[in-house]
Amino acid sequence: MPKKRVWTVTIGIRKKLASGFRDKLLFSSGIKLPETELNPYTLRFKDDEFETVFTKQHVDRDFPQSVVYMVVGIFAWLTYSILDFLVLSGDELFFVLIDRAIVITLLSILVLICFLPNIQGKIQWILSACMLISGTGIIAMTAYISEPFNHMYYAGLILVVLYSSNFLLMRFTYSLAVSAILYVSYMVIVTTVNPVPEWALISNTFFLTVTMCWTIWTRYWSDYYIRSDFAARHFLIKEKRRSEKLLEAAEAGNRAKSEFLAVMSHELRTPLNAIIGFSEMIQQRLFGPIGSDRYEGYVDDIAHSGRHLLGIINDILDLSKAESGKLVIQDAEVSMFGVIDEALRMAKGKAAEEGIHLAFDMPDKDIIVKMDLRLFKQVILNLVSNSIKFTDRGDSVIISLEQQPDGGCAFIVDDTGIGIAREDLERILDPFVQVESSISRERGGAGLGLPLVKKIAELHNAVIEIDSNPGVGTRVKFIFPAERVISRKASAVEQEVA
């Protein structure tokens, strides 16, 4: 292969390796969740709660490995004592053996401490003490023994630093602090307490400095990638849970839409059948000429069915506009007594037909509220119609007004109907949701009333409150905020609508 080709291939490989490393680095640090952000200097998560979660899981997983590693260190100290017998003698050998015995005893105590209950929270101090005790033992030997061995035992300090850098649980900041203490202590000993030859000092300082810088560097990146990996796994788990919730919501939405379509088809088909059937009877003059009195009832049925269809279509259109943000309110100062009275006159026929007692419990003063008259009238009709629909013959639906402590005004509809289970109270305000399809089909309704009322409330900065007990009844509050209440006017005490 020509040299130029080899050079090109080599550059391509290097670019791919560099790109792969860069992508990995970006992936490790590119997580955007606030709780996973790392402080680049201390390598702590900026979110204290997330740091606590990481620490607990990390310690629970790697604590046994750290204990085993400490035991291995004790055996290493015992093994290296063979060198003491080969190179030392007399008082120096005795001192070094005592030194090793003290270090091994202290390390053994640290291992036993690890078996105490709830000690995992102190693991950083235990590992730091393990590194500090081991390094101090080597420095003590360097301070006591004579040449040439006083400048040879520094190799043991290098081994201690390398050994301690492999503690997976030891945080970068603790490792850096202990390494700095050992480095300064060693330099003080070999320059003042028990000086070593200049050539040995230069050599030892170079290798010890390089070793400590290297281990600090590797400890930093080891800690960084352990934390980045944990953050990435947390991100994936969180995304998985979010995806599962979205899938559940989508499935629930599909089910709700299917139920809605079933109810809607029933709601639309019934009045359409009546309109078409009665129209054909009149068209075919089954009961004689058009002037026959029997046709008058059919005309009323056709008109009633047409109004019912128009109401459903208006609800669908208004809800669709509200969902798309195109439903705009036209504010006007409106008398609550007036709008309620007008709406209830439209509803009293249905109430009388169903045998429901419909009444307006009026306060002593009228209330003027800034609102969209048409939309609030729709709120009244929807809430009252709902109550009538789910209230048995002979029971009551009572409308009232209530002044709120903060100056707001609540429009209230109370009924003694079948009620709603508490777990279903929030769902009934969602579009396309039918709490109980069989009841809805039995009593009628497309399930659009309450979602539309909720949207109208949001446009008015109002609040919907629903309190219900199955078999007892339901209370619905439409609460206007204080800034929409203009004034109160004197009026009669009570007005019976039906």
Image (cartoon, grey):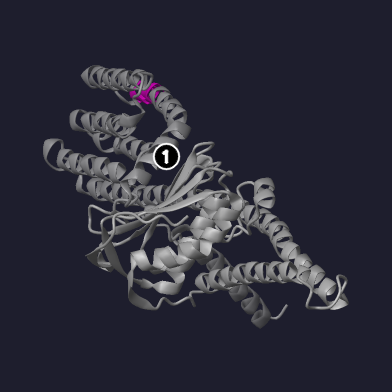
Of 156 and 276, nearer the camera is 276
Magenta range is 77-86
Task: Name which residue type carries label 1.
Answer: Asn
Image point (58%, 43%), residue name: 392
Above or below residue 489? Residue 222 is above
User: Dot 1 corresponds to which residue?
Assistant: 166
Magenta stretch containing residue 376, yes or no? no
Of 404 and 252, nearer the camera is 404
Q: How far across and how far down the image is residue 298, in percent?
A: 74, 68
**Alpha-carbon neighbours of circle 1 within 10 Å: few (<14), some, or many (≥20)?**
some
Tell me if 488 is positioned left or right of 329 in this view: left
Magenta stretch containing residue 85, yes or no? yes
Q: How far across and how far down the image is residue 168, in percent?
A: 42, 39
Image point (52%, 59%), residue name: 348
Tell me if 390 is positioned left or right of 286 in this view: left
Res. 450 visible in picture: no
Which quadrant holds the N terminus?
A: bottom right
Of 216 and 96, nearer the camera is 216
Q: Main secondary structure of the magenta part?
A: helix
Tell me which corner region of the image, top left, top right, bottom left or bottom right, holds residue 174: top left
Of 5 and 354, nearer the camera is 354
Tell me if 246 is positioned left or right of 71 in this view: right
Res. 116 visible in picture: yes
Tell me which corner region of the image, top left, top right, bottom left or bottom right, holds residue 135: top left
Image point (41%, 42%), residue name: 54
